[in-house]
Image (spheres, rainbow, N blue to C red):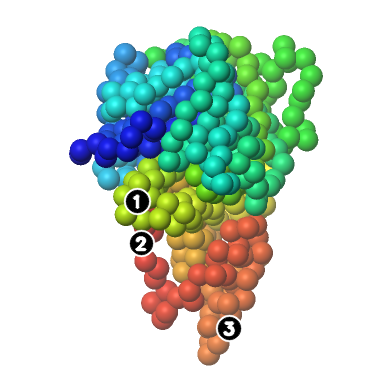
Amino acid sequence: MERPIRGSMYDVIIVGARISGSATALILAGRGYRVLLVDRITFPSPTSSSTNLIHPPGVLRLRRWGVLDRLKAHTIPEITHYSLQSGSVRLVAPLPAVEGVGYALSPPRISLDQALAEAAVEAGAELREGISVQELLRENGTVVGVSGVSKSSGKISEKATIVVGADGKNSRVAQLAGAEKYRDDPVLSKSSWTYWEGLEQEPLVRTYRKSRRHPFSWPTHDGLSIVGVAWPAETFPSGDPDQTDRLVIDAFADADPEFAERLLRARRGDRWLTGAVPNFLRTSHGPGWALVGDAGATRDPITASGITHALLGAELLADAITDGLSDRPMAEAMADYTARRDKLIGDHYDYTRDYAKVADHSPEERALIAAMSRSPRHGQDMIGLFATIVPPDQFYTRGNFRELFGHLGSGPDVPWKSRLVRWLIDGVPGRPAWASGTADRLIAAKIGPMGELLLRSPVPGASGTRPAPASTA
Ligand SMILES: Cc1cc2nc3c(=O)[nH]c(=O)nc-3n(C[C@H](O)[C@H](O)[C@H](O)COP(=O)(O)OP(=O)(O)OC[C@H]3O[C@@H](n4cnc5c(N)ncnc54)[C@H](O)[C@@H]3O)c2cc1C
């Protein structure tokens, strides 16, 4: 594509050059726009505040942009299945494929961030490291550039048609632009996690829910595995760090004694890290500025969706900026971006927020998880929901859940409330629609914020079938 000629200033200045910033830069630079990408860090730069699971829609983008090819120095196993074990009930299902990518990856963050930045530079972006942006330049109320301090050359100031804040959850750009939070939830969970050596490498993300603890583990890179536990923030054991080994092993032993034995036969390969973030959505555009990645939307890491959504958000923003630099008013293109970004992540944000309470499942919820484990389609959709592939409003539908109750089984472990709902779904002679409506309301009352989605979904027709879920990718 031919580069548009726009004088000496940049088309886009992007503040923050990790996941969302470099991804936005590489797409726009690849389309021929003049992109300045700045970060206060110098690559390679570790980030100790993140694990690194990337769900299939994110992996697809990294593959498409040639970023995976840059990670070949590492052995990064493909993770094809996710599991959720709640008490004695276990759901294991394969990930739904997104355009042929049916696996997750967990590359080392330090290498991933550098690979993305290098890909942006190769696409034509100008990367300046060691620059801390401190102010936004404005003309008639519109942002027209940034000023800051460079480690090597003192004060800097640059202008662009649009300034993008890809500068993380404590975004300076958001603060300077006055971006309001319109969803604002506190820190809900807090985790301890580290890398484990010598653990058998299965292509599986393990998650558990027991005794208000959420143990998790998956293979990452070069023979290592992530091992950790999330607690509700208010019960996080913040005492002696030397106790963390015991607390984590105890949580696994409670949820899955066999896996705890495996942990004991292997060994911890790094120090324990602690992570917790608040949850919010920020207004993500205004005159001359936009936000992407964590700067605009931060959510609890319990669903490991921040990187994947940052990559998809970068794609949406780059498309909107392309429109705004072509023949569409920039303000209109940016409003469209925010609406599409919210559609992409809004319901998953609610799902994540609910999950991050680390509440134990009720017997009725466990009966539904058991039903999902008997219905391969429901099981795979549930895993796809967690992995940002199946949109929540396509999973939490009346039709889908009425059908799921057909897989409840008949054992004595099915709670009486679940049997009652199944009876209502199967219908009272002559009044099936009334009874099913009651069943829907009972189900909705049990599934937190997802209940609203279920009640908004269409009432199934006589066949009771539902359309196949559409991927967000
Ligand atoms: C404990 C924990 C575990 C997580 N695990 C996962 C996981 O397994 N999978 C997943 O998908 N997500 C995970 N996440 C979330 C993920 O880390 C974030 O969603 C992701 O890093 C967001 O990327 P970003 O590029 O938007 O922001 P960041 O990665 O925060 O990058 C922002 C960049 O902006 C730069 N910057 C900031 N201010 C300025 C300034 N004034 N001037 C210049 N530069 C500036 C910073 O130096 C930084 O390089 C986890 C988060 C936590 C806390």
Of pointers 3 and 2, the one earlier in the residue sequence:
3
Label 1: which secondary element: helix
Camera-near label (3 vs 2) is 2
Q: Amino acid at mark 3?
A: Trp
Camera-near label (2 vs 1) is 1
- Residue 92 figure quarter: top left
Residue 24 as seen in the image, left or right of residue 238 = left
Camera-near label (1 vs 3) is 1
| Image x and y of residue 8, in percent | 36, 31
- Residue 464 figure quarter: bottom left
Q: Amino acid at mark 1?
A: Asp
Of pointers 1 and 3, the one earlier in the residue sequence:
1
| Image x and y of residue 424, in percent | 58, 75
| Image x and y of residue 414, in percent | 60, 58
What residue is drawn where x is 64% and y is 37%?
175
| Image x and y of residue 467, in percent | 37, 66
Which numbered tag is attached to residue 443?
Answer: none
- In this view, the residue in front, 377 or 242, is 242
- Residue 391 figure quarter: bottom left
Query: Which image quadrant: the N terminus?
Result: top left
Residue 143 vs 224, above or below: the answer is: below
Q: Would you name the residue on which mark 2 appears?
A: 468
Q: Would you name the residue on which mark 3 appears?
A: 434
Label 2: which secondary element: loop
Would you say the beta carbon of the disc 3 residue lies within 8 angstroms of ligand 1?
no
Q: Would you name the residue on which mark 1 appears?
A: 323
